Amino acid sequence: MFKGQSALITGGSRGIGLAIAKKLANQGATITLLANNESVLKQSVKQLSSEYDQQHAILSVDLLHLVQENYNLSKLQDSFKSHSILVNCAGITTHTLLQRTTQKQITETINLNLTVPIILSQLCVKHMMRQRDQNPSILNIASVLSLTHHLLPGTSVYAASKAGLLGFTKSLAHELKGRVRVNALLPALVKDTEMGKIVKGDLAEVSMDVVVNKAVEVLSELSVNGECITLD
Ligand SMILES: NC(=O)c1ccc[n+]([C@@H]2O[C@H](COP(=O)([O-])OP(=O)(O)OC[C@H]3O[C@@H](n4cnc5c(N)ncnc54)[C@H](OP(=O)(O)O)[C@@H]3O)[C@@H](O)[C@H]2O)c1
């Protein structure tokens, strides 16, 4: 289904990002996995199917560096040229009550979960617009915690970052209508990931399979644009 398409997946070394990458590779996509830890990335890329002779790649970048004023974004430009799919999946949470959250934790959570997807989308979009025959698409992985009817103490900064991501998704989808599709998934708790293990409290759950299948459906379905889809 994705034969001939190339997908950049942030947070692709493990968890939800890697699971989406595996499914897209099974369906013919060529994958670039982006994360910080290079040795984990090297192991993760070996898990992707190359049944369609794809040459998968890894990109080891600390995404938090992208928000620094003196970071030379042009270094990344070449790596971003060929992708018709961007999955913004890298994310962090500290799960800490606000009064115990440090300023560094606040800044990093907002930067990684919101500012970085905005910067990466900006880097990819101009190349995507030249590949309209490839059904170019951005998928942002938000969270049910960005919705006001899913509340959990210790997640206010995370919720704020993901709510911002929803606003960005809706507005950019409108801006790029007919050229690049932009959507978001809002999964409930996915227990079997590193992040899933640190979240404590009463929160609806969803299986990894449901998240992955919906991601693939949204990326392949030409009519879906500007949707923020709750998975609980
Ligand atoms: N798990 C859940 O219950 C759940 C529910 C709803 C939404 N989500 C969202 O889904 C996404 C994936 O979650 P997950 O549970 O799969 O998380 P995870 O297992 O903790 O994986 C996080 C990924 O992000 C990467 N990452 C973190 N900081 C980075 C940085 N500074 N630079 C580059 N890469 C970085 C990690 O790579 P390195 O280790 O190399 O840094 C890893 O690949 C997140 O956006 C999360 O908010 C998760």
Image (cartoon, rainbow, N blue to C red):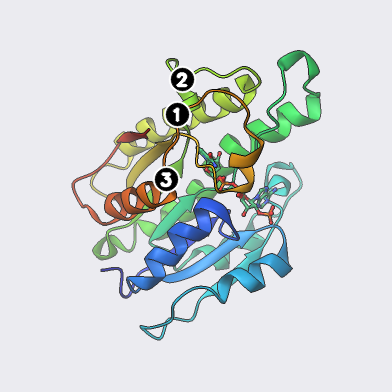
Judging by the rendered image, the residue that carries numbered circle 2 is 150
Q: Quadrant of residue 232?
A: top left
Label 2, ligand 1: CB separation under 8 Å:
no
- SS class, disc 2: loop
Direction left: furthest residue: 223
Judging by the rendered image, the residue that carries numbered circle 1 is 204
Q: CA distance from mark 1 to mark 3?
A: 11 Å
Q: Earlier in the sequence, mark 3 or mark 2?
A: 2
Q: Classify 45 as above or below 148.
A: below
> Is 170 left or right of 120, judged from the image as shown?
left
Q: Position of residue 206 (x, y in %)?
A: 42, 39
Q: Position of residue 159 (x, y in %)?
A: 55, 24
Label 2 neighbourhood size at 10 Å, few (<14), some (14-19), many (20+)? Answer: some
Judging by the rendered image, the residue that carries numbered circle 3 is 207
Q: CA distance from mark 3 to mark 2?
A: 17 Å
| Amino acid at circle 2 | His
